[in-house]
Image (cartoon, rainbow, N blue to C red):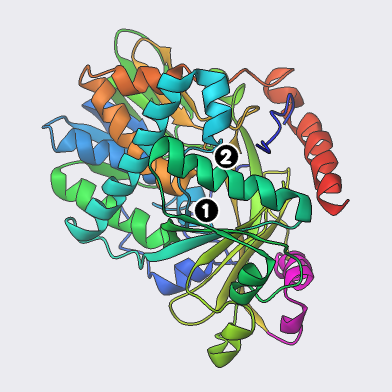
Amino acid sequence: MRTIPALAALGRDDGAATAFPPAASYYAAANPPPPERPRLEGDLRADVAIVGAGFTGLSAALHLAERGVSVVVLEQARVGWGASGRNGGQVHTGQRREQDELERIAGRDDARKLWELAEEAKVLLRDTIERRGVDCRYEAGLIHADHKASYVAETHAYAHKLAEDYGYGLIEPLDREQLRALVKSENYHGGSIDHGGGHLDPLALVFGLARVAEAAGARVHENSGVRRIRHGARVTLETDGGTVSADTALICTDGLLEGVEPAVEAHVAPIANHIAATAPLGDRLREVLTSRAAVSDSRFVVYYYRPTPDGRLLFGGGETYSTTLPAEIAPIVRRHMLKVFPQLRDVAIEHAWGGVLGITPTRQPFVRAIRRNVLVAAGYSGQGVLLGPMFGKILAEAVAGRLERFDLLSRLPVPAFPGGRWLRRPLLVAAMSYYALRDRL
């Protein structure tokens, strides 16, 4: 199978703002933010302190609070400020790496456990939507589109492998004509559609997770960035306004931790991704997509897009390797969008924004106990919509002493970046530029 290369070298908003930035996302327009939560003032004690109010941190808080554990979540800006509230909203099947690659890396037994964990993550997502009443406007269907003809046979072979070896028969191979009937672009030569994947509004999901976590008893403090972690028998998280002392700390910040915990920064690097949403297209939406499925293509620097509930095209494309987002994002995304859909040349872009996510050298998630009482889950490398809430649940299990699934994830190989955090960015630029060039050849 074609695999994503393990980069030997592969952002952060600075957290100073207290609301969504001027280039607000489509999600921010569609989901008015809840009232601002209080800034941490003074000194608190808790059983567990969590850094980051995204998918992972809020899910961990929810599952801990439901067990009667006292939990405090510290968020440097607002709930959903980071990648959890600003991504493409795509729900992919499996882990970030394909199963044949996981079999090679982790062995067949662990690869199967990782598959089952990812399938359980779908069950957890459905439970969040249906039983907990979190309306994140989920829609089924995720198309994989191959931009090179030589990739199609491998895509079809992988669909057959999942059906035969893992009993997953929900991926339908597509030839060139079938793919182009769904995605009206001459850019693609075939692919597949995963009827078990889908897409959703990620900010609605993270807002909902915050609501149910607080209802269970978790405390969430916004505008309370952690400036320092003091380690010891108890862990103390220091902010500008106060401290939280806890038996255990969970670091759940993905790409937005900087200057606080070197052990995490050595393994997780931030990159900025750019997304735009067109004006509502009405009947013209069928000029580009004839189904409600999302699309993700085979480029290393991937293009991903989907229809929104109000008939827009939401398109992601173009990465930068700085934690500072460009002043003008719309022209960057438009250039990529028109490579796929030149028929949208006259269509207005009404929203354009960026977000910072965390990646690792191997694109495996970085899940570790970096100290006896400090656990981390980060570096989802673009798979956080499905895996983030599940990994939060697994962190909660680990705090309760149930370590089997935490240890499974900890066995995945995630080396530090060569040169540590100081050389991550120049090496990342070189590596990603190389693979972006391969996309064009």
Q: Nearer the viewer, residue 79 or 367?
A: 367
- Please identify, in this view, whether the residue under mark 2 or under mark 1 is nearer the observer: 2
Q: The residue under label 1 is which amino acid type?
A: Ala
* Element on which disc 1 rests: loop
Answer with left or right where residue 15 lies relative to residue 132: right
Residue 290 belongs to the span the image colors magenta: no
Q: Is residue 356 visible?
A: yes
Q: The residue under label 2 is which amino acid type?
A: Ser
Where residue 337 sits, quadrant-wise, is bottom right
* Element on which disc 2 rests: loop
Which residue is farthest left? 68
Q: Is residue 64 above or below residue 324?
A: above
Answer with left or right where residue 247 lies relative to residue 204: left
Answer with left or right where residue 414 lies relative to residue 128: right
Look at 29% across and 44% down and name the residue there: 220
Look at 80% across and 34% down and name the residue there: 431
Q: Main secondary structure of the magenta part?
A: helix
Look at 37% across and 47% down and name the residue there: 222
Q: List the residue tagged with mark 2.
A: 381
Badge 1 local density, few (<14 within 10 Å), some, or many (20+)?
few
Q: Nearer the viewer, residue 370 or 397?
A: 397
Residue 49 in the image: x percent, y percent? 30, 29
Q: Is residue 75 visible?
A: no
Tell me the CA gap for discs 2 and 1. Answer: 25 Å
Look at 11% across and 32% down and name the residue there: 68
Q: List the residue tagged with mark 1.
A: 17
Residue 142 in the image: x percent, y percent? 50, 60
Answer with left or right where residue 403 lies relative to residue 192: left
Q: Which mark is residue 108?
A: none
Question: Considering only order in the chain, which callout, 1 or 2, is on the residue closer to the N terminus?
Answer: 1
Image quarter in which the N terminus is found: top right
**Which stretch appears magenta?**
329-347
